[in-house]
Amino acid sequence: MEQTTSPETVEELHAGFHSLREEIGKVIVGQDEIIRQIFVSMICRGHVLLVGVPGLAKTLLIHTISDAIDLSFSRIQFTPDLMPSDITGTEIIEEDATTGRRQFKFVKGPVFASVVLADEINRTPPKTQAALLEAMQEHRVTAAGHTFNLPEPFFVLATQNPIEQEGTYPLPEAQLDRFMFNLWLDYPTFDQEVDIVRQTTSAARPEKKHVMSGADIQRFQTLIRQIPVADNVIEYAVRLVNKTRPAGDLAPEFVKDYISYGAGPRASQYLILGAKASAALEGRLTPSIEDVNRIAVSVLRHRIVTNFNAEADGVSGVDVINRMLEASV
């Protein structure tokens, strides 16, 4: 039997996000759209790649979100010598104090948390990156022939520094595709920076409280899957993704000129899931084309590959996406 969307649960999500935003605002100044899209990703069972220069409170932001939702949090600092077992966990030999028998015991790694901050993920080799990305996809870890399920909900926010590329291992396109959103964190405005400095250089510390639970997030994740979508919105999202593929019939000339590879079907899925979540956050029971457009850049920017012509003309992937969105209006 087909499940129907509960208006009460949609209203609860709408009110819950408002409370969450107020709670986060006690610690984080500004960044409203970034916070919104991180939460959208969480309730869509997605993950986020956050790109920003040092000092923009990326770690503080995700820690504050996990506190406000009462979720376990762990931070992994990615370095060139980090091993896969440093993320997933390792087996140790343990001796029974009464019998003297020795046996292997699996010690869980930092990936066993509901919110995992993967700091500077591009500073570790692909083999170690893959250990985290497998956990993101499967929500489980396999070690020594045993499978261990990760806690639910499970959300990964990975960060990258865009200005320091020495000693980095950029994520391959196939691995970037695992992330629902690629968000770019901008500098605060002048007034916001004044507030940040005033807030962080005083002795006062805000009193934090939990406004949601992990069970709430799981209920909202179920809700998002139940929200109906009109056929024309689905067709719009699929058409938008098809336009990014230079070899396709729907690709405009500027896409054929500037793009080597376009986005895959996962982009279409995330556009619709994200549009559903965006609508629900505003208390609406079904998404519109405007909801798709609102998240299109975040979903597509890391899934398209520009060519030499784009580099020569100073055209970025975001420029191409924005041009596509303008042509679709």
Image (tube, rainbow, N blue to C red):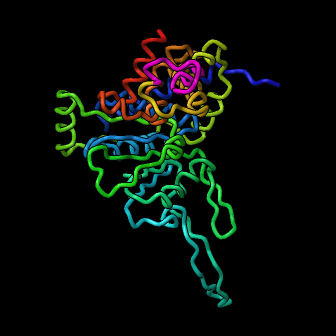
Q: What segment is highlighted magenta in the picture?
A: 237-256
Q: Residue at x 27, y 43 (%)?
A: 53
Tell me the quarter of the image containing the N terminus: top right
| Residue found farthest to the right | 1
Q: Report the number of discs.
A: 0
Q: Residue furthest top?
A: 329
Between 106 and 325, the residue placed more toward the observer is 325
Q: Residue at x 46, y 51 (%)?
A: 73
Residue 123 in magenta stretch: no
**Residue shown at 47% from the left, 28% from the top:** 17
Of 273 and 266, the residue lying toward us: 266
Indicate left or right for 244 with 218 as reference.
left
| Residue 4 visible to an observer of this rendering | yes
Left or right: residue 325 versus residue 265 is left
Position of residue 111 relative to residue 284, above or below, is below
Is 248 covered by the magenta stretch? yes
- Eyeballing the image, is 319 above or below 199? above
Q: Is residue 60 left or right of residue 287?
A: left
Residue 310 pos. (x, y %): 36, 30
Residue 295 screen position, x and y as percent: 47, 25
Image location of residue 251, percent across then percent down: 52, 20
Q: Nearer the viewer, residue 43 or 66?
A: 43
The image shows residue 242, relative to residue 185, as above or below, that is: above
